[in-house]
């Protein structure tokens, strides 16, 4: 059975976060020196990343001693992803938000822009007023939230997301907390 493009990007993210040297080497080919340094952190401080079953509602689950979160992977050649174009996406996000809030987990959306040079990944979370326990609450404060339309549909604008390399640096303590919050609030 042939892999879909979505499967390829799920695997790419899984292997990068898992600290797979081959995947990281491939990822950093078009990255800046700072982006490359951040990705290389995964070689020493990786996550255990598990591909989730389709019915679970998320693609990956990343686990490490300090942070754990479910990840839904989306990819597009377009810089803006409107969930309203597919009602299933909105239902999936609502289910993920509810489940994560009940479990005090941070729902992560990883948006891969196809054909992008440099860091092609942008990270978002679903907006919520619910506080999350532990270190994930700190992440919730710095990761950009998806936009919500007046009709309650989500929008991810790739240019407004957090670079994956910046998230990696933040979680690994390479960025001072106050400094990071200022960078990501811009």
Image (tube, rainbow, N blue to C red):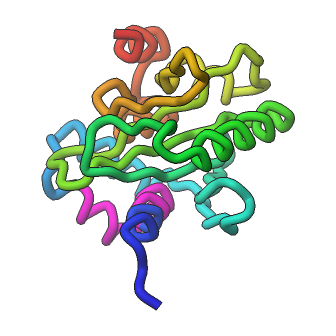
Tell me, yes or no, if residue 116 can be seen here: yes
Q: Quick check: is 122 in the magenta stretch?
A: no
Magenta stretch prevailing secondary structure: helix
Q: Residue furthest right?
A: 102
150 and 156: which one is in front? Answer: 150
> What residue is at 34 percent from the left and 45 percent from the top?
121
Residue 172 drawn above or below residue 20:
above
Residue 116 drawn above or below residue 134:
below
Q: Quick check: is 25 in the magenta stretch?
A: yes
Tell me, yes or no, if residue 69 can be seen here: no
> What residue is at 43 percent from the left and 36 percent from the top?
82
Residue 168 drawn above or below residue 2:
above
> Could you say where residue 107 lies in the image, as x and y percent from the top left?
64, 38
Dividing the image into 4 quarters, which one contains the C terminus?
top left
Q: Which residues are magenta?
A: 12-27
> Could you say where residue 123 lies in the image, as x and y percent from the top left?
44, 36
> What residue is at 51 percent from the left and 55 percent from the top?
46
Asked if residue 134 lies left or right of residue 83, the reply is right
> Could you say where residue 25 lies in the image, as x and y percent from the top left?
25, 63
Asked if residue 57 lies left or right of residue 31, the reply is right
> What residue is at 68 percent from the left and 27 percent from the top?
135
């Amino acid at each position: 059975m042939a892999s879909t493009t979505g499967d390829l990007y799920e695997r790419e993210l899984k292997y990068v976060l898992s600290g797979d040297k081959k995947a990281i080497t491939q990822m950093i080919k078009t990255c800046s020196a700072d982006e490359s340094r951040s990705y290389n952190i995964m070689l020493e401080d990786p996550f255990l990343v598990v591909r989730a079953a389709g019915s679970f509602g998320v693609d990956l689950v990343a686990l490490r001693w300090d942070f754990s979160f479910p990840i839904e992977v989306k990819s597009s050649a377009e810089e803006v992803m409107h969930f309203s174009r597919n009602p299933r996406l909105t239902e999936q996000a609502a289910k993920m938000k509810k489940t994560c809030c009940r479990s005090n987990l941070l729902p992560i959306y990883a948006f891969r822009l196809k054909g992008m040079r440099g860091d092609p990944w942008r990270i978002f979370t679903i907006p919520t007023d619910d506080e999350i326990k532990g270190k994930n609450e700190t992440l919730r404060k710095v990761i950009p939230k998806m936009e919500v339309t007046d009709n309650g549909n989500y929008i991810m604008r790739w240019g407004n997301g957090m670079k994956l390399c910046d998230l990696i640096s933040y979680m690994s303590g390479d960025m001072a907390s106050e400094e990071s919050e200022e960078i990501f609030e811009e």
